[in-house]
Amino acid sequence: MRGKMTVLLDSPEEISMSETVAYEGKLVPVDREGKSLDLWIQERLGWSDLRGHSNWLEALEETIYGGYFYDSSKAVLYEVQRRELHPEDFIHATANADGSFDFVVGYYNGGASFEEVMGSVVEN
């Protein structure tokens, strides 16, 4: 489901359901300084008990939502550095040494033409 869904409640208000989002960012491996994952998280959160969470990773992920990602296949914790982009209005382009450009764009085609967007790619 995309967009918003209106639900009738005792007091009328709109509840936002799932929606399209776009981020640009970087996953940076966390230097745990030789500490176990659980100990590092305890120190990061400043807690000595789980406060109702099932485990320390869950506590981290729910307390700092979107701030960390754990790759269990490699046992690597990443800090997430990101910025939100408007899902229908972004341009990410890289100029290559051979004069070509790699690009990812999202835009409302009722407000800009493909040519206008490509102009922005090569100008920036």
Image (cartoon, rainbow, N blue to C red):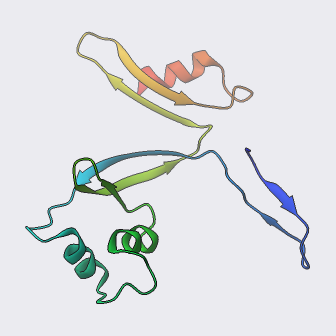
Asked whether 1 or 4 is in front, the reply is: 1
- Seen at 34% across and 26% down, the residue is 94
Q: Position of residue 23 (x, y in %)?
A: 47, 46
Above or below, comparing residue 46 to residue 61 in the picture: below
In this rendering, the answer to whether 49 lies above or below 63 is below
- Which percent across, then down, holds residue 56? 33, 74
Taking the spot 28% from the left edge, 86% from the top edge, the residue there is 46
| Residue at the image position 30 percent from the left and 49 percent from the top | 27
Q: Considering depth in this image, is 90 or 35 the residue closer to the camera?
A: 35
Which quadrant is home to the N terminus? Answer: top right
Residue in the picture at 50% in, 51% down: 84
Give the tally of numbered discs: 0
As drawn, 97 above or below 62: above
Displayed quadrant of residue 116: top right
Seen in the image, is 34 located left or right of residue 49? left
* Left or right of 84, for residue 55: left
The picture quadrant where one finds residue 58 is bottom left
